[in-house]
Amino acid sequence: MKTLPHYLLAHLEGNERQIELNLIIADIADAGKKIAHEVQRSGLLDLHGAAGGQNVHDDEVQKLDEHSNSIMKDILSANEHIIGLASEEEEDVVDVSNGKDHGYLVAFDPLDGSSNIDINMPVGTIFSVLPSAGDIKEDFLQPAGKQVAAGYVLYGSSTVMVFSLGNGVHEFTLDPDNGEFVLTTENIKMLENTGYIAYNPYVLPNMDPKKAEAYRQLCDQTARSMRWIGAMVADVHRTLFKGGFFAYPSVGKGGNYKGKLRMQYEAKPLGWLVEQAGGKAILDDKPINDLTSSDLHQKVSVELGDAGTMRLFESFL
Ligand code: AHM
Ligand code: MG
């Protein structure tokens, strides 16, 4: 049995960022444990329901979104290697540099899948870690390939932390008996041409017709089952372990199609993880590493999956 601290020590040996990444991942794991505790008790602690307000994306903020955001901010802002934070729930970057001119940035969605909170369904915390030479706002916009770590903590039937430090994707499961994350899957490799198809078919009439047709063909030709949890973090977790296809396309009316998922907090970290596990991610119709970010709260379309299923999907475009 390997616990997270022991695994990190060995896994990061010789890595030039060993100390920093160790401490950042340890802090995110700690925040994940605290959020897991709150999620499990949310019905008892009156943490269900809306907080009464909207975030910068015009989403209705839930009490547990706010709570999770505070936990992430409190823990990460005390880490001396982190100089900037960006959250789906914050309008602007949070400068925690205390005068330091370089260090690390962490972008996060504190609780993805808000609509699942009140119904005891999976939700998760997504994170992306980038190096920064001091221009905090600009450095958050670096391409996906510049991430030095990314992953998520998923609060499902058990709490798992899945991440990559650029060298394989690994899963740790929280042991409720001793509060330790324990290595449960090392080097996740996505299965090919299997698994589920995941998108919301009700958006097909409001998509670019050619793209919608590719979605339909993928269903027809693979004849696989569909699954849709409604929290990207949970849908991507299933896709990592079972293979398949997950998409949230650009939708709209009259040719004005727009993505919904957030580049910095959802698409960039989760797309990168999928590619690290041998899959493929397309954001706004471009391979993930070809897309540059325009702003902190940019929204993009997402199509990702195992390499075989993605090849088939792209052959229909
Ligand atoms: P959130 O970050 O506010 O929870 O919203 C993002 C979520 C994704 O996780 C999920 O894939 C999508 O919204 C589902 O959206 P919809 O409910 O519109 O189908
Ligand atoms: Mg989200």
Image (cartoon, helix red, strand yellow):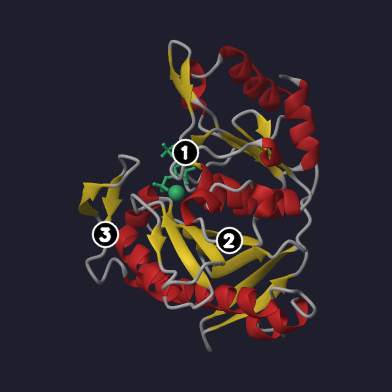
Residue at the location (80% across, 44% down)? 192
Residue at the location (75% across, 54% down)? 277
Locate the N terminus by quadrant: bottom right
Compared with residue 130, is residue 185 higher up or lower down, i.e. above or below?
A: below
- Quadrant assignment, res 252: top left
State ligand 1's quadrant.
top left
Residue 228 falls left or right of residue 121: right
Residue 181 falls left or right of residue 68: right
Q: Position of residue 54 (x, y in %)?
A: 25, 45
Residue pointed to by mark 1: 298
Q: Position of residue 17 (x, y in %)?
A: 69, 73
- Quadrant assignment, res 98: bottom left
The residue type indicated by label 2 comes to Ala
Which sits earlier in the primary sequence, circle 3 or circle 2? 3
Residue 88 falls left or right of residue 46: right
Note whether residue 276 is visible: yes
Asked which secondary structure carries label 1, the reply is loop
How far apart in space, not on screen, are marks 1 and 2 (Cα)?
Answer: 22 Å
Q: Position of residue 59 (x, y in %)?
A: 31, 42
- Quadrant assignment, res 4: bottom right
Asked which secondary structure carries label 3, the reply is helix
Asked which secondary structure carries label 2, the reply is loop
Q: Quick one: which residue is furthest to the left in this view?
A: 52
